[in-house]
Amino acid sequence: MHPRVQLARSFARAAACLGVVLVLAPTARAEHHEKTDPHASHAATVVAPSQPIPRTSRPADAKLYIISPTSGETVANPVTVRFGLAGMGVAPAGVATPDTGHHHLVIDAPLPPMDKPLPKDDKHVHFGGGQTEVTMEMAPGEHTIQLVLGDKDHVPHDPPLVSEPVTFTVR
Ligand SMILES: [Cu+2]
């Protein structure tokens, strides 16, 4: 019994080593082919692409808009931005209800890519709780804001639902 247990253990250890080798081998082979064989390199690209992120469809006639402030307006701090959505509903992040999404405010930044989760930082603010307005302090001067609706995973819908940008001044 005792030697058999030892044998089984060393087999398991060998299998574990083999497993590591098997996992690493395809990568090493792909790198090798990339350098030596252009056809194999192309095949490797097709086999292992970055998977497209699933997108959520939405009603074609939905509208996203900024109720206030309005373009050209001058406002005082704190600034309240009100979000408008028609033809769809607001749902918190993580909730998979058809034809819903949550608001994202892009502040003084270009629109981010529409085929991946929206960034989350000072210029890309998520309202994952289902909020429909925000009140915030903004630096005096001109600002441009834009709304993007995101699905439960913070990914813009297909097609993306984006508001017109609004440029206003904070005094
Ligand atoms: Cu989000």
Image (tube, grey):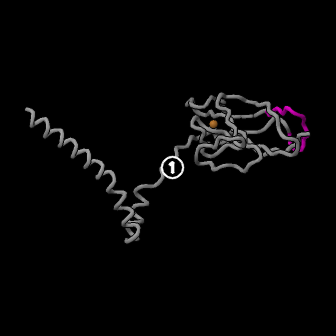
149 left or right of 17 in image: right
Give the residues drawn in magenta, as a range: 70-81
16 left or right of 48 in image: left
**In front: 162, or 17?**
17
Name the quadrant of the N terminus.
top left
Characterize the local packing of mark 1: few (<14), some (14-19) or many (20 or more) Cα atoms within 10 angstroms.
few
Residue 155 higher or lower than 133, as above or below? below
Residue beneath the point at 82% across and 32% down? 80
Residue beneath the point at 60% across and 31% down? 93
Quarter of the image for residue 12 reads top left
Residue 3 higher or lower than 51, as above or below? above
- Residue 61 in magenta? no
169 left or right of 52 in image: right
**In front: 76, or 14?**
14
Residue beneath the point at 36% across and 66% down? 32
Residue reaching furthest to the left: 1
Quarter of the image for residue 58 reads top right
90 left or right of 43 in image: right
Return the x and y of residue 139 as percentages of the image width and height.
84, 40
- Residue 79 in magenta? yes
Return the x and y of residue 90 as percentages of the image width and height.
66, 30
Quarter of the image for residue 29 reads bottom left
Q: Residue at label 1?
A: 52
**In front: 83, or 8?**
8
Return the x and y of residue 103 as percentages of the image width and height.
68, 35
Name the quadrant of the C terminus.
top right
**In front: 58, or 16?**
16
Return the x and y of residue 98 as percentages of the image width and height.
57, 32
Tell me the SS state at disc 1. Answer: loop
Quadrant in which ligand 1 is drawn: top right
Disc 1 residue type? Pro
